[in-house]
Image (cartoon, rainbow, N blue to C red):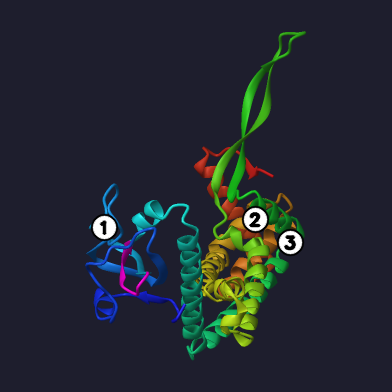
Amino acid sequence: MSEPPIHFRDFEQIKNRERFDEACVITRANFEDLIGDYGFDRDVKCQVERKDTKDILCGHDHKNGFVGRRAGGAEGLIGRDCADLYFKDHKAFAAKRSFVTRELAIDDLIIRLQRMQHDDTFLSNVNLMGNRVRALREESKALLDDLPQEIHKRLRDMAKARSPALTIAVRYMEKVEDERTGKISEKPKWVAQSAGTVVGIEIVERTEIIDLGKTLSSIGETFDSLNTRRELGKTKLLAQLKVLESVPRCESQLARLELQYQSFKKPENIANLWLLSRNQANQIECLRLAARADGTQDVKEAVLKTRLQHFIKAMMHANSGLDVRPDV
């Protein structure tokens, strides 16, 4: 091929070529080479030979195709559909088409990679996101580690099951007849009832945060060692591009994780975690952490116990004064 394949974006680029001839007919017999491909926003006429005719233009309207050269040097348009149909099983055309497609794909990859390479904000943005991920990982871990072990474990199980529901058990008394004596007695029956949800529970599952940090590190390493040489080939160039083009997805993922953590660490959300244990010491500790999240560092034990009793009484009042307890 006398020149590298060209991707034409405007018909005028083709029309102004010295050998382009809008009247030439390209056939299976006279086809010689492909100059490149094109994609327009306006219709142009296909110049392959019309089916069941001799030297008559196809004339099919299209916007995408190839610039072909026939024996003798004249150049014309080959619509993409006609390329598929008219040149089916044409080995020479298939080989030229494969070459043009591959070379233009490499051109596109190099352009996109070099655009990123010369973007002065690219790496600083990735590093900034890396810092945000580290801060998120450390802060959320510290909060989770402060929780009682029993509650932390329940949260992990809930996050893994994607089940953030909090439930209480309400004690009802039901009449039971003794089968032998016929005597009627009352027996307590605990009935589960919804008590809300743990907001932002996804932050408890650490895998996503850790993997995001690794991905951002990989992006930084790929950028630092970026190679845009054509000799590298399509596969390796594309592999680099996929890594670098994952930045917007990472940014969206990080924003979602940060929002989840902001929701999870709200005082009212942490306070609700007392519902994950029947152990009063664990319940009190959740209320202590909630107070800290609200800006109060030292709260007396008696105050926290009173607060816990207030929550329990409010739930009893909402259930006609019946006894309630965490449904765990």
Residue depicted at 60% across the width and 72% down the height: 239
Question: Badges 1 and 2: C-beta atoms under 8 Å apart?
Answer: no
Disc 3 or 1, which lies upstream in sequence?
Answer: 1
Q: Nearer the viewer, residue 173 or 213?
A: 213
Res 224 seen here: yes
Q: Per the image, is 72 magenta?
A: yes
* Res 274 label: 2
Left or right: where 71 falls relative to 244: left
Q: Nearer the viewer, residue 218 or 256?
A: 218
Residue 163: x and y in percent read 60, 48
Question: Badges 2 and 3: C-beta atoms under 8 Å apart?
Answer: no
Q: Quadrant of residue 142?
A: bottom right
Disc 2 or 3, which lies upstream in sequence?
Answer: 3
Left or right: where 84 falls relative to 116: left
Q: Nearer the viewer, residue 73 or 210?
A: 73
Disc 1 or 2, which lies upstream in sequence?
Answer: 1
Residue 324: x and y in percent read 62, 42
Amino acid type of the residue that numbered disc 2 sits on in the rendered structure: Trp
Element type where label 3 sits in the image: loop
* Res 279 label: none
**27 in relation to 300, above or below:** above
Res 135 seen here: no
Residue 156: x and y in percent read 69, 56
User: How far is the residue under mark 2 from the one under mark 3?
Assistant: 10 Å
Amino acid type of the residue that numbered disc 1 sits on in the rendered structure: Asp
* Res 148 label: 3
Magenta range: 71-78
**237 in relation to 118, above or below:** above
User: How far is the residue under mark 3 from the one under mark 1?
Assistant: 85 Å
Residue depicted at 50% across the width and 58% down the height: 91
Residue underneath mark 1: 55
